[in-house]
Image: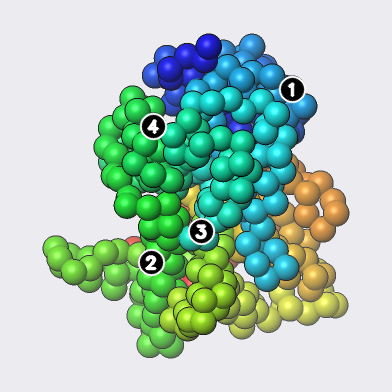
């Protein structure tokens, strides 16, 4: 018989691997599954491929319990099946095919009294849409098989306990269930690994809450990105203005502009919300406008770079450019939807020699070619540098001293003033 608190995590990416690690830390017998054999091989070699977990932290994971999706026998030994798979937005609609495919593969191993918990970002109604038909035919769903949804609330890059307050373990965790028995089953496991659980009244409320959280962020980032353009016209420093406004202790949260937005959440979740709204005859004009503002700000940054240095746009002259930071945000090794990539490709298209420096991403494939991160020691060889990501270990004094020209898209040098510094 399966242990009361044994679990399988399906999908060991930016969400699944930290959850697997946390379950292992809490001494819950856990199996991990991923479709990519390369990930399983790295984990078994004690090598982490995500920035939020150091390789030495993988020691607590039982390497004998890691498998590819072609070896699913251990599903039968798990009381809980936690699904953490990507849900991209493709062909103008949410793509839940990876979840459906994984679910189809595990169905032969499902047993009575197991609980499925979906962690992936989905639209309201998706959890039932994916699982209900099969589970309700094979089991008495809600009585001898249970279904829950719990949206992930991982903030990549926030691992410094001296700097940040909330982490995976102590961030309030929303849980929901197909019925009360299902909710209680989710609670029974998650109360052992998360310090604060928040029960949603339904699967749909929990699903929608995830989209609301990230649409809120998208709207506020869109606002400050638009304000950045206005302040540039007024010759005012947007970052200093945000710091000043942030002295208000109520009714205001600080959001900072940048060269655009990346990752899976901020660029994608508003699309889910817009799609489900249109599907039900509603409009999300405000949310969609914010999303478009965040997309367009990257083009504005590129235009400003060309305006300040027209020679970078010339197809006849090659200039050497160093982009500092390819990750979409500070202290992660994730380049999904990163604005840095668009900046890189555009500058490359204009016949420039473009390199990058990012210690989190030592190698990457761009424009069908693998390139390596270059050392900052070579910074004097470049006509200009573009700070696109502000990792916490950024050598800003060294860069400021040695770079010929700096385009700062992250407010790193908000307190500096110099002719070679262009704040964007």
Residue under label 1, please give it: 71
Q: How much space separates mark 2 and mark 4, taking CA atoms?
A: 30 Å
User: Percent position (x, y) of residue 243?
Assistant: 26, 65
Q: Mark 3 — residue?
A: 125
Where does residue 290 sit, x and y in percent of width and height? Answer: 47, 77
Location of mark 4 (residue): 185
The residue where tag 2 is placed is: 216
Q: Position of residue 389 (x, y in %)?
A: 53, 55
Residue contact between numbered discs 4 and 3, judged by CB atoms under 8 Å: no
- Mark nearer the N terminus (4 vs 1): 1
Look at 62% across and 77% down and name the residue there: 299
Q: Which coloring applies here?
A: rainbow
Mark 4: few/some/many CA within 10 Å (<14, 14-19, 20+)? many
Choose top left, top right, bottom left or bottom right for residue 414: bottom left
Tell which circle, 1 or 2, labels the residue nearer the N-terminal end.
1
Q: Give the farthest residue toward the bottom.
A: 233
Query: Mark 2 packing: few (<14 Cα in 10 Å), some, or many (20+)?
Result: some
- Of mark 2 and mark 4, the one earlier in the sequence is 4
- Residue 327 percent across, percent down from the top left: 59, 51
Q: Identify the disc placed on residue 2.
A: none
> Helix, strand, or loop for circle 1?
loop
């Amino acid at each position: 018989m399966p242990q009361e608190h044994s679990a399988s995590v399906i999908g060991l990416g930016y969400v699944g691997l930290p959850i697997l690690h946390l379950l292992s830390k809490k001494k819950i017998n856990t199996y991990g599954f991923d479709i990519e054999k390369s990930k399983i091989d790295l984990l078994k070699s004690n090598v982490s491929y995500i920035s939020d977990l150091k390789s030495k932290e993988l020691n607590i994971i039982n390497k004998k319990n890691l498998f590819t999706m072609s070896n699913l026998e251990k599903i039968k030994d798990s009381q809980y099946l936690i699904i953490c798979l990507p849900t991209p937005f493709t062909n103008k609609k949410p793509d839940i095919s990876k979840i459906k495919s994984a679910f189809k593969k595990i169905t032969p191993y499902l047993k009575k009294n197991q609980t499925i918990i979906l962690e992936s970002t989905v639209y309201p109604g998706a959890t039932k849409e994916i699982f209900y038909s099969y589970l309700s035919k094979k089991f008495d769903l809600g009585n001898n098989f249970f279904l829950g949804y719990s949206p992930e609330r991982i903030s990549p890059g926030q691992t410094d306990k001296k700097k940040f307050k909330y982490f995976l373990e102590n961030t309030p965790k929303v849980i929901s269930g197909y019925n009360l028995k299902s909710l209680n089953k989710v609670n029974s496991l998650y109360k052992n690994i998360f310090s604060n659980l928040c029960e949603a009244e339904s699967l749909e409320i929990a699903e929608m809450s995830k989209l609301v959280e990230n649409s809120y962020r998208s709207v506020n980032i869109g606002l400050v990105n638009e304000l950045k353009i206005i302040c540039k016209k007024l010759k005012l420093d947007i970052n200093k203005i945000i710091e000043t406004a942030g002295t208000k202790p109520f009714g205001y949260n600080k959001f900072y502009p940048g060269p655009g937005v990346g990752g899976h959440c901020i660029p994608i979740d508003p699309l889910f919300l817009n799609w489900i709204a249109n599907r039900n005859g509603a409009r999300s004009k405000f949310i969609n406008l914010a999303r478009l503002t965040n997309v367009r700000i990257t083009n504005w940054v590129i235009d400003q770079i060309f305006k300040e240095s027209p020679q970078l746009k010339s197809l006849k002259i090659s200039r050497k450019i160093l982009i500092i930071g390819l990750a979409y945000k500070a202290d992660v090794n994730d380049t999904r939807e990163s604005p840095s990539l668009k900046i890189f490709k555009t500058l490359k298209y204009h016949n420039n020699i473009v390199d990058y420096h990012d210690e989190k991403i030592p190698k990457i494939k761009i424009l069908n070619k693998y390139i390596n991160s270059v050392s900052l020691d070579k910074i004097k060889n470049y006509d200009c540098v573009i700070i696109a990501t502000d990792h916490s270990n950024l050598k800003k004094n060294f860069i400021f001293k040695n770079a010929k020209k700096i385009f700062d898209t992250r407010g790193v040098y908000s307190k500096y003033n110099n002719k070679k510094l262009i704040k964007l």
